Image: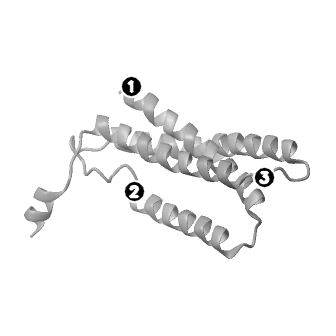
């Protein structure tokens, strides 16, 4: 059974796994940016709120996502298997965090606890570090 599972597991080179990871980060960041633009409506003080969301996203990237993306890039580069599983761009813990964040975003949107114009600012805040992480993965793929 183990041989069968190993045989049907989709595999990709470590080099191209970096590109797959970049595409996933780009998809997530792009989706949040799209939702942010869709839900945005000018509210009181909106220019400052946009600047605050964008700046906060940059700081969040610098303080957290830069370290996370570096950790995943290094983990992929140091994999022993030259052709790892296509889905191994994240480790199990990161898949769990992703599931919690997606559930939280859907929960916030469907619960209407936060008005959509303000939720759009949060989506902008979160899209910035995701998109910048995608750039980091593309860079790692190019210089691999």
Single out the residue that lies furthest toward the right: 44
Q: Which residue is mark 3?
A: 41
* Label 3 – label 1 distance at C-alpha: 38 Å
> Residue 135: image x %, image y %?
51, 33
Single out the residue that lies furthest toward the top: 143
Image position of 79 (left or right of 90) = left
> Residue 56: image x %, image y %?
74, 45
Q: Residues within 10 Å of mark 1 (few under 14, many from 20)?
A: few
Single out the residue that lies furthest toward the bottom: 111
Camera-nearest residue between 98 and 53: 53
Front position among marks 2 and 1? 1
Q: Quadrant of the N terminus?
A: bottom left
Q: Residues within 10 Å of mark 2 (few under 14, many from 20)?
A: few
Q: Which residue is mark 2?
A: 91
Q: Are marks 3 and 1 in contact (CB under 8 Å)?
A: no
Quarter location, residue 131: top right
Image position of 5 (left or right of 130) = left
Quarter location, residue 117: bottom right
* Label 2 – label 1 distance at C-alpha: 22 Å
Tell me which colouring the rendered structure shows.
one colour
> Residue 15: image x %, image y %?
30, 34
Residue in view at x 59 percent, y 68 percent = 106
Marked residue nearer the N-terminal end (2 or 3):
3
Q: Which residue is mark 1?
A: 142
Camera-nearest residue between 45 and 16: 45
Disc number for residue 19? none
* Label 2 – label 3 distance at C-alpha: 37 Å
Marked residue nearer the N-terminal end (2 or 1):
2
Marked residue nearer the N-terminal end (3 or 1):
3
Camera-nearest residue between 121 and 144: 121
């Amino acid at each position: 059974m183990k041989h069968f599972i190993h045989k049907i597991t989709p595999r990709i080179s470590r080099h191209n796994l970096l590109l797959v990871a970049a595409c996933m980060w780009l998809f997530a960041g792009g989706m949040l940016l799209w939702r942010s633009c869709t839900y945005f409506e000018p509210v009181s003080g909106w220019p400052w709120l946009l600047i605050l969301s964008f700046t906060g996203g940059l700081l969040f990237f610098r303080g957290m996502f830069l370290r996370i993306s570096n950790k995943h890039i290094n983990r992929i580069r140091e994999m022993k298997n030259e052709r790892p599983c296509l889905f191994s761009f994240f480790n199990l813990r990161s898949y769990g965090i992703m599931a919690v964040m997606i559930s939280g975003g859907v929960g916030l949107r469907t619960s209407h606890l936060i008005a959509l114009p303000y939720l759009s600012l949060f989506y902008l805040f979160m899209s910035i570090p995701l998109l910048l992480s995608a750039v980091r993965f593309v860079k790692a793929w190019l210089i691999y």
